[in-house]
């Protein structure tokens, strides 16, 4: 079964490595079972006036966030 993590490149520069979405309580990398679960989580964190996303491409385009499959 595949798992997904959300990450971004600091300052939007891929040479800077990756920063991962962490659980606020445990400070562990958050892991999602599906792409849709990851996208739903991001949408739940957005303000009402923010544009909701529905695809992985929109996640990157609007918020500079990426998904990576982890085993």
Image: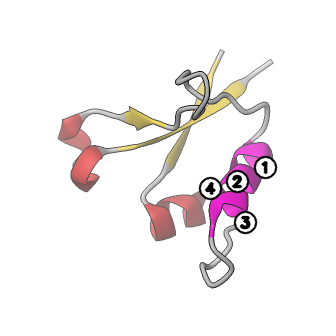
What residue is shown with label 3?
54
What residue is shown with label 4?
56
Q: Which residues are magenta?
A: 35-46
In the picture, measured across the screen, residue 11 lies left or right of residue 69, that is left
Report crowding for label 3: few under 14, some 14 to 19, many 20 or more residues within 10 A (C-alpha): few
Q: Residue at x 70, y 62 (%)?
A: 43
Q: What label does residue 13 carry, if any? A: none
What residue is shown with label 2?
39
When the figure is inspected, residue 45 is found, relative to residue 20, above or below; the finding is below
Q: Residue at x 27, y 46 (%)?
A: 10
Q: Residue at x 63, y 73 (%)?
A: 47
Report crowding for label 1: few under 14, some 14 to 19, many 20 or more residues within 10 A (C-alpha): some
Could you tell me if the residues under marks 4 and 2 are in contact, i.e. CB atoms within 8 Å?
yes
Q: Is residue 50 visible?
A: yes
The color scheme shown is secondary structure
Q: State the CA–CA distance, disc 3 to disc 4.
A: 7 Å
In the picture, measured across the screen, residue 41 lies left or right of residue 12, that is right
Of the image marks 1 and 3, the number of the one nearer the N terminus: 1
Q: Position of residue 63 (x, y in %)?
A: 47, 63
Quadrant of the image for the N terminus? Answer: top right
Toward the viewer: 16 or 41? 41
Q: Residue at x 65, y 32 (%)?
A: 4
* Residue 56 in which image quadrant: bottom right
Q: State the CA–CA distance, disc 1 to disc 3.
A: 8 Å
Q: Secondary structure at mark 1?
A: helix
């Amino acid at each position: 079964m595949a798992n997904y993590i959300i990450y971004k490149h600091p300052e939007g520069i891929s040479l800077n490595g990756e920063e991962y979405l962490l659980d606020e309580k445990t400070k562990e990398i958050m892991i999602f079972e599906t792409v849709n679960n990851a996208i739903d989580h991001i949408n739940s964190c957005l303000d009402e006036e923010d544009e909701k996303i529905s695809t992985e491409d929109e996640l990157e385009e609007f918020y500079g966030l990426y998904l990576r499959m982890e085993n």
